[in-house]
Amino acid sequence: MKDWFMSDPLRGALLCVAVPATVIMILQTVMIFIGMAGHSDVDMPDDNGIDGVFGNDSPDAPDVHFGDSGLRIFTVRGMVAFFAVGGWAGLSALSLSGSAAAAIITALVTGTLALLLVAWFFKWAASLNENGTLQMESAVGKVGEVYITIPANMSGTGKVNVIIQGRLTEAEAMTEGDRPLKYGEPVEVTGMAVGNVLKVRPVKK
């Protein structure tokens, strides 16, 4: 294994980036759709303290925006997409051309496009809420997933991903609980606060 890696370090490095990122992307997708496709009696698997793997978009983490568009670029899902798509594209370019330069350029370009696509998708999903096409009240009783940590005791807002009217929606949320709700944690929408902010609580096991 070591000899193979040393004989083709670029291919080995791309594999080491692409494979873990792809696994994380698949797990993220499963966590979203298992918890959101159903009803409050459908539990998503607990993250078991794996915020270190999936990341933790806390309210204190810096947001990087694209110009004045409000596009959040460097989110957890965006970076996972960057490494997964870029890694496999780089491997394909390396196999087809045999050129390390072509592989690196291809990986960077396709990874950046994937990063931007994820950012645009979530911006579009958020805009559905902003333009009034979604009835946020219909989220009550649904199960979602925390995307940005929600502070305890209604002391601030975080964000959740939840299916509203058949659409994956990123929405602001608060909790009355005495502990913060962390990234990836399954939550149930219990009501509405001022300004279309959802009130959520942890899913009971």
Image (cartoon, rainbow, N blue to C red):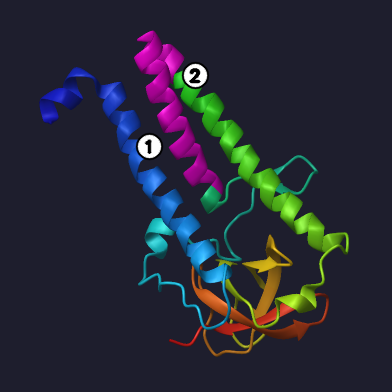
Name the amino acid type tagged 1.
Ala
Residue 97 is covered by the magenta coloring: yes
Q: Is residue 28 magenta?
A: no
* Residue 113 drawn at (x, y percent): 60, 32
Give the image quarter of residue 130: bottom right
Q: Is residue 42 left or right of residue 14?
A: right
Where 93 falls versus 89 (above or below)? above
Residue 42 placed where, x, y %?
A: 50, 78
Which residue was labeled with disc 2?
105
> Helix, strand, or loop for circle 1?
helix
Q: Nearer the viewer, residue 142 or 6?
A: 142
- What range is drawn magenta here? 78-103
Q: Mark 1 against mark 2, which lies toward the viewer?
A: 1
**Quadrant position of the N terminus in the picture:** top left
- Determine which quarter of the picture holds residue 4: top left
Q: Is residue 47 left or right of residue 1?
A: right
Secondary structure of the magenta portion, mostly? Answer: helix
Give the CA distance from mark 1 to mark 2: 15 Å
| Residue found at the very far right of the displayed protein | 132
Amino acid type, residue under disc 2 in the picture: Ile
